[in-house]
Each structure stands twice: as C-alpha cells, then as structure tokens.
Image (cartoon, helix red, strand yellow):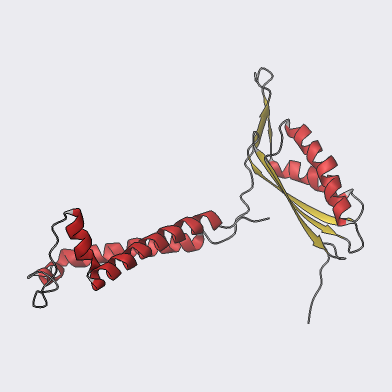
Amino acid sequence: MRETAGKLNRTWLAIIGLVSLLLGISCILLASGAALGIAAATGVGVQPADPSDRALPGGFQDIFATPLAAVIVAALGVLVGLLALGWLLAQVPKRNQARTFRLHTDDAVDGQTNCEPHVISDAVEADVQRISGVNTATALLRGSASQPELNLDVKVDPRADVRSIIDQIHATVTPNLETALETPLRKTAVLVNVTNRRSRDKTAVL
C-alpha cells in the first residue's frame, strides 16, 4: 500500500555505477600504458609522465592554506551531507494518496464536484467487504481524477476462494469505481492476505 523510492534508487545507482565504470576503465588504461597508444592514434597530444615528475604542480598545497579553502570544503561537505540525508529520507515508504478529486463534465457548464479520496476509498472498502470470504479491505486511491489508480489490501479467510474474490473485484468493484469517477482506472493493484483475523482484532504476544 506504500510506495518506495525504487525509481530514484535505480537512477542514482545507475549514475554512480556508470561513473565508477568510467573511472575504472581510465585507471586501467593509464596503468597499462594503453592510454598513450589511444591518445597517439586519435591525435591527442598527451605525453606520459616521467618517474621524476611531481605528482602535483608546485604550489598546489598553497591553495588549501587560504581561509577560503576551508570554507569551500566545509560547504561541499554540507552539500554532500544534505544530498545523502535527502536520499535517506526518500527511502521512507509513502502512501502518496491522491489529492482532492475535482469531478466535472467535459464542458464544465454544470460546475464541478470536489470529493476527498478517503470518501471514495471508504465506499470501495465497503464494496469489497460485501464479497463472500473477505474479512477486511483497505483501499488507497492515487493519481488524479483523470488518471486514477486503485490499490487494495484485502484480507481473506483461509477457506475462501482467492481466485473468485479477485475476479469479483475486477468484475464489480472496479467497474463501480470507474462509473463513480466517470473514467477508467489507469492501474489496479490487489494485495491479498490470507488470515482468519480481522484487522481490528487486538492481540498480544508474550
């Protein structure tokens, strides 16, 4: 019922992996000497370093001796920390419930009707719970009034026919919701949990 930052993670991991791959290839080419041959073949004027050459140019350490360097390093550290914190916070699963639905006809001459998503969700839950074998149901609407999405968490009795329940959801509940919203659902996801307990039951395990 909650969404995770899977797309964000895949994007950043792909970027980090690509950068790491390019750096690794560059290091291998430089260490093996193949980089010089590639540079010569492409006409890039790159000369190999002599063993007696300095790794860093003279006076390079003077750059970090100024007070401004400490400020820049601190600012970069804070920036990296904020980016890492933002990525960490993005890992918290979110419900991402839809905002208020604004329902109206194409010409909108008759005005529009504002409907909170939880009102429609309650009706969907009641509709699902009327199906034989369903103990409880939790509905979550995402998207917009023109492209709605429905997520259902259905708890069914162990003796219930799960296939029949899913078929009835797609045959009755989904069409009823589409009729109410006057638009087809963009996506419907149903999570079925087999349990003989209702979600409102309170149990303690010692």
Q: Is residue 180 above or below residue 83?
A: above
User: Which x, y percent locates residue 158?
Assistant: 89, 64
Q: Residue at x 73, y 33 (%)?
A: 181
Query: Relative to the observer, which residue lies in front, 41 or 146?
Result: 41
Please give the count of numbered marks on the rendered protein: 0
Query: Relative to the observer, which residue lies in front, 26 or 168?
Result: 26
The answer to which image quadrant residue 78 occupies is bottom left
Q: Residue at x 76, y 35 (%)?
A: 178
User: Which x, y percent locates residue 11?
Assistant: 47, 55
Q: Quadrant of the N terminus?
A: bottom right
Q: Is residue 120 above or below residue 35?
A: above
User: Which x, y percent locates residue 143?
Assistant: 63, 42
Q: Residue at x 91, y 58 (%)?
A: 160
Q: Residue at x 56, y 61 (%)?
A: 92
Query: On the rendered structure, is 157 left or right of 46?
Result: right
Q: Quadrant of the C terminus?
A: bottom right
